[in-house]
Image (cartoon, helix red, strand yellow):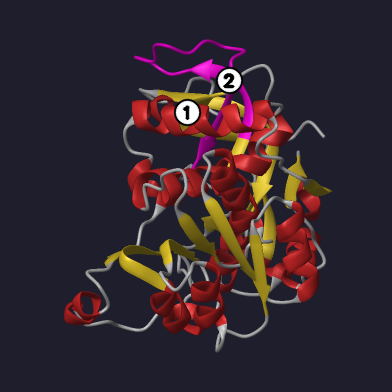
Amino acid sequence: MSEHYRLVIRQPGGPEAIEREVFDLPPVPGPGEVRIRNRAIGLNFIDVYHRMGLYPLPYPAGLGREAAGVVEALGPGVSGFAVGDRVGYLFAPGGTYATHSIAAADSLIRLPDEISDEMAAAALLKGLTSWMLIEKCARVAAGQAVLVHAAAGGVGSIAVQWLKAIGAVAIGHAGNDAKAARAKALGADHVLSGDFAALAASVRALTDGRGVSAVLDGVGRDSWQASLDSLARRGTMVSFGNASGPAPAIEPLELSRRGSLMLTRPTLGDFMVDPVERQQGADALFGHIKSGAVTIEIGQRFPLAAAAEAHRALEARETTGSTILLP
């Protein structure tokens, strides 16, 4: 299809709220910008939250947080990139559910030849989140034990593999036995499943009573107490999501009582500001993928025009691995 279009929402709603909007491409991007022809677009659960209005956007709003493609045009003042370069990018102002996007040149991530467009679109957001959690927030060292919630999920499945690649001990928790088995297949040293009531006791049993050096918690409210109870002295609680609802408030003194714990609530955007640091994170991710230490499973491919169908499948838990949209 030759027309240029993007997918937008004009108000919060279900998958049916996603609309197709045709737009004209500027012949020349603005200063410091490039025009990208998207070849593969990542689908993430945050896209559903944006569509539903859980994370409100100014409407009409474009959807999508990551994509990969080829540079088609350069705006004034752009250096370091050329027409034809393959790039990935995150957080484009107009969203990434589009045949083409305009993005700031200093937001781009260079893609090595070994990383396909589809792989980049499937891996960038979740992979860089894992890099942020493990390398930047928890600063995990070889031999340390780390508890990963939702260990078979998008971020969790990469985090488990990343932890093993750096020599850490990965303890995965999942909602049921089947998901726990998947985490085990990904390389988790220990896997636990079921409710959170007995989780901390199980974690301490696996660590000779010490607890873990860090918890990577994207679940939020339901897992909060178990996560705190699982931490060793001077452990780090990394709360990065709220799949079950926002985590409760905590008094700073409670962290002291529990053994001088550290708590952080990061967002990836704050680790993507510096182009050098962003490319370093991407290079670390790509290095693990190229070595085979981290495997990215693309379970589903949908046409971009069928994004509503992809959202329905994601919400119904009918997807496995990563899902991408193809323009």
Check if mark 1's residue and mark 2's residue have beta carbons within 8 Å: yes
Question: Which one is in front, 40 or 203?
Answer: 203
Question: Which one is in front, 118 or 221?
Answer: 221
Instruction: Kindly report the distance in space between the C-alpha atoms of the residues bearing marks 1 and 2.
Output: 10 Å
Q: Position of residue 17 (x, y in %)?
A: 67, 68
- In this picture, is 148 found above or below 43? below
Residue at the spot of label 1: 108
Q: Is residue 181 left or right of residue 227?
A: right
- Residue found 35% across the figure and 26% down from its top: 276
Can you tell which mark lies on residue 71? 2
Question: Which one is in front, 87 or 265?
Answer: 265
User: Is residue 69 in view?
Assistant: yes
Q: Nearer the viewer, mark 1 or mark 2?
A: 1
Q: Range of the magenta residues? A: 68-91
Secondary element at image label 1: loop
Q: Position of residue 91 (x, y in %)?
A: 47, 45
Does the magenta portion include 281? no
Answer few, some or many: residues within 10 Å of disc 2's Cα (few below 14, many 20 plus, some between 14 and 19). Answer: many
Q: Position of residue 297 (x, y in %)?
A: 76, 45
Q: Quadrant of residue 66?
A: top right
- In this picture, is 17 found above or below 38? below
Q: Position of residue 310 (x, y in %)?
A: 77, 59
- Residue found 47% across the figure and 48% down from its top: 143
- Residue found 48% across the figure and 24% down from its top: 34
- In this picture, is 7 found above or below 109? below
Task: Classify the position of the C terminus by image quarter.
Answer: top right
